[in-house]
Amino acid sequence: MSTQTVPGIATFADTVAGLVAEGLDERTLTARIRDELEAALAAGLELPEEVTRPDPVRYVMYPLHVAADGGFSIASAVWDVGQGTPVHGHETWGVVGIHSGVEVETRYEKPAEPDVPLVREGTDEWTAGQVTVCCTTDDDVHQVRCGGDRPVVGIHVYGADIGTLPRRGYDPDTGAVHWFTSRWADHHDTGA
């Protein structure tokens, strides 16, 4: 999927590239991207069906744009009804806007040491048009799931190529860490 085939994403990707190039601190950068994504969603950003299709087995992330230098990526993340992620971190900043459906996010305090049970900070429901800074490098642990009776589709912007970035997964009860890398879904099939 090329951003050339999704005009609204191509324009948004150009905007994100410009913001990244400004060399802003992470909190300012994510706040600005949040505002831009909110405006794009309010303007009726459309996504083709092939990047909003859920997989029957697990959540999927379709690449909408990956910067040539890997400096940021934009994904369509799709959870079917009943699906969610394990508790995980991102190892970079991220901004999430809900395109359709309801996403339930449970946040955890980022552990200061290994093998200590995680502390739950709270849960929010995000609906179509809402945008949040999901993570910064120092505040980066959550779990998300579909919260409605239809799939949830989110537009996720990360400060790296999230489809190749090693990230931490957590057992919230023990604090045990395992490393994983999300794999980009192929928009021609729904294999995860």
Image: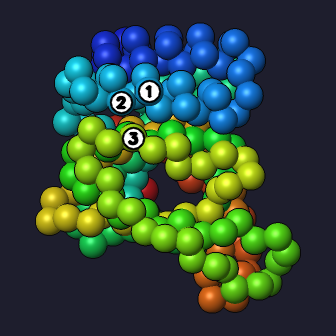
In the rendered view, does 185 fall on the left or right side of 162?
A: left
Q: Residue 35: x percent and y percent?
A: 44, 27
Pointer 1 residue? 35
What kind of residue is marked 3? Val
Left or right for 169, reference 76: right
Find the distance from the CA under tag 2 to the CA under tag 3.
6 Å
Residue neighbourhood size for the residue with mark 2, other residues' Cα within 10 Å, grouped as few (<14), some (14–19), many (≥20) = some
Give the residue at x 51% y 27%: 33
Q: Is residue 74 left or right of residue 98?
A: right
**Disc sitting over residue 131 in the figure:** 3
| Secondary structure of the residue carrying numbered label 3 | strand
Of residues 173 and 168, the one drawn nearer to the viewer in this rendering: 173
Q: Nearer the viewer, residue 23 or 180?
A: 23
Tell me the quarter of the picture where residue 83 sits.
Answer: bottom left
Instruction: Name the residue carrying label 2.
Output: 38
Labelled pair 1, 3 in contact (Cβ < 8 Å): no
Q: Position of residue 48 (x, y in %)?
A: 22, 30
Q: Earlier in the sequence, mark 2 or mark 3?
A: 2
**Which quarter of the picture shows residue 92?**
top right
Please name whichever residue, 32 or 80, is drawn nearer the observer in this view of the structure: 32
| Mark 1 or mark 3: whose residue is earlier in sequence | 1
Q: Quadrant of the C terminus?
A: bottom left
Q: Crowding near pointer 3: few (<14 within 10 Å), some, many (20+)?
A: many
- Label 1 neighbourhood size at 10 Å, few (<14), some (14-19), many (20+)? few
Work out which quarter of the rendered image holds the N terminus and state it: top left
Kindly check if marks 2 and 3 are in contact, taking CB atoms under 8 A apart as contact. Answer: yes
